[in-house]
Amino acid sequence: MLRARAPFAVGDHVTASGTTGGVKQTFPGEVIVARDDGTYDVRFTDGELRKQMKASSLKPDLELRLFRAVADQGNAEAQCSLGVVYDNGTGVAKDEARAVELYRAAADQGHARAQFNLGDMYHHGAGVAKDVARAVELYRAAADQGDAGAQYNLGVMYEYGRGVA
């Protein structure tokens, strides 16, 4: 007897929606157990584990899937946004190395916010070896495009003589 795949599988990223204090919210999580009866155990990003949730209360994390699909096609905005998702661990496991890859792909296309974010990664040695001079290069590239955060960070680097000759 063949069984159809349940709507969700272990490892799928999902969201549940609910109302907290009168405010409708969504809660991202990951399926950790999928049962034949259509119930699931879901661990939410805040660490809470909910058991025996019904499929009707879960939705696939479509936004994340769309970002991935568009980023895979080389879209710099999606690459930068997905980099932020991995950098912060929003709805996915925090993965600074993956964030660096995505920021780099977008920064190489001239995306100012990705250049700024990648500069921060180099500045702090997050997901990449610390390289303050490289951080300054990236801040400068983003600052030249008008990114205020990069302009500020570049000014701080000059004020304290970090990564500048």
Image (spheres, grey):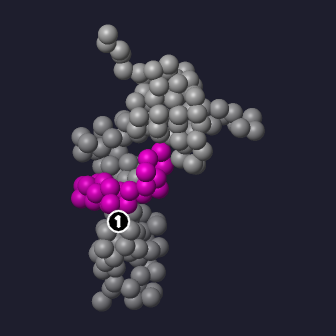
Q: Nearer the viewer, residue 78 or 109?
A: 78
The residue shown at (75%, 35%) is 22
Residue 138 figure quarter = bottom left
* Residue 157 point in image, percent of width and height: 41, 82
* Residue 113 point in image, percent of width and height: 39, 58
Quadrant (top left, top right, bottom left, bottom right) of the C terminus: bottom left
Residue that carries the numbered disc 1 in the rendered image: 127
Amino acid, disc 1: Gly
* Left or right placement of residue 31 versus residue 57 in this view: left
The residue shown at (35%, 65%) is 127
Q: Nearer the viewer, residue 100 or 52?
A: 52
Does the magenta run of residues contain 120? no
Is residue 114 in view from this perspective? no
Which region of the structure is painted magenta?
A: 87-112
* Residue 72 point in image, percent of width and height: 26, 42
Does the magenta run of residues contain 103? yes
